[in-house]
Amino acid sequence: MMNKDTQGPSKEPNEVEIFVSKSLRFGVLLSGAVILIGLVLFLSSGEGGYPGDSYPTRLRDIFAGAFDMKPFGIILAGLVLLICTPIMRVGISALVFLKEKDWLYVGISAVVFIILVSGFFFGK
């Protein structure tokens, strides 16, 4: 008969890890699908939807171009989604540590999350 202490980790962390894993897979697949749609539109139309060699650089312009079905806007929106996937992972980790009341890692994860998000919005 196995001792309760030697049975391994509890069920809850495994469920959290599975949720995080599925979230990361979903983010990668979604961004890949969006990029693929933009690439197909680009290859079928032969143009990026913007004049010359220009393309949007601000988030608002990227998503506006994606909603207008401009191929470069869609491709860039997919790349933004791909970049956001690991940032989401850090946010989920902060929530998991908060649920476990592990305050040190809540603080560390929250600071990293804030730095990533602020760098994403205010960085050049």
Image (spheres, grey):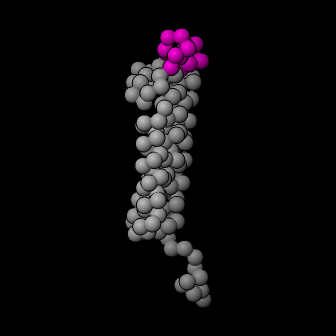
Q: Nearer the viewer, residue 109 or 70?
A: 109
Query: Does the stretch in magenta take in 108?
Result: no
Q: Is residue 67 visible?
A: no
Residue 49 vs 63, above or below: the answer is: above
Q: Quadrant of residue 5?
A: bottom right
What percent of the width, then of the height, locates residue 107? 43, 61
Q: Residue at x 42, y 42 (%)?
A: 118
What percent of the width, then of the height, locates residue 60? 39, 28
Residue 61 vs 82, above or below: the answer is: above
Q: Main secondary structure of the magenta part?
A: loop
Query: In the drawing, does residue 15 fall left or right of residue 43?
Result: left
Residue 95 vs 114, above or below: the answer is: below
Q: Nearer the viewer, residue 55 or 49?
A: 55
Q: Nearer the viewer, residue 116 or 48?
A: 116
Q: Quadrant of residue 47?
A: top right
Looking at the rendering, the stretch of residues picked out in magenta corresponds to: 41-55
What percent of the width, then of the height, locates residue 50? 49, 14
Q: Residue at x 41, y 20 (%)?
A: 68
Q: Residue at x 59, y 18 (%)?
A: 43
- Identity of the residue furthest to the bottom in this view: 1
Q: Nearer the viewer, residue 81 or 23?
A: 81
Query: In the drawing, does residue 43 fall left or right of residue 114?
Result: right
Question: Which image quarter holds the N terminus?
Answer: bottom right
Q: Is residue 124 visible?
A: yes
Q: Residue at x 41, y 67 (%)?
A: 103
What percent of the width, then of the height, locates residue 83? 52, 40
Q: Quadrant of residue 45?
A: top right
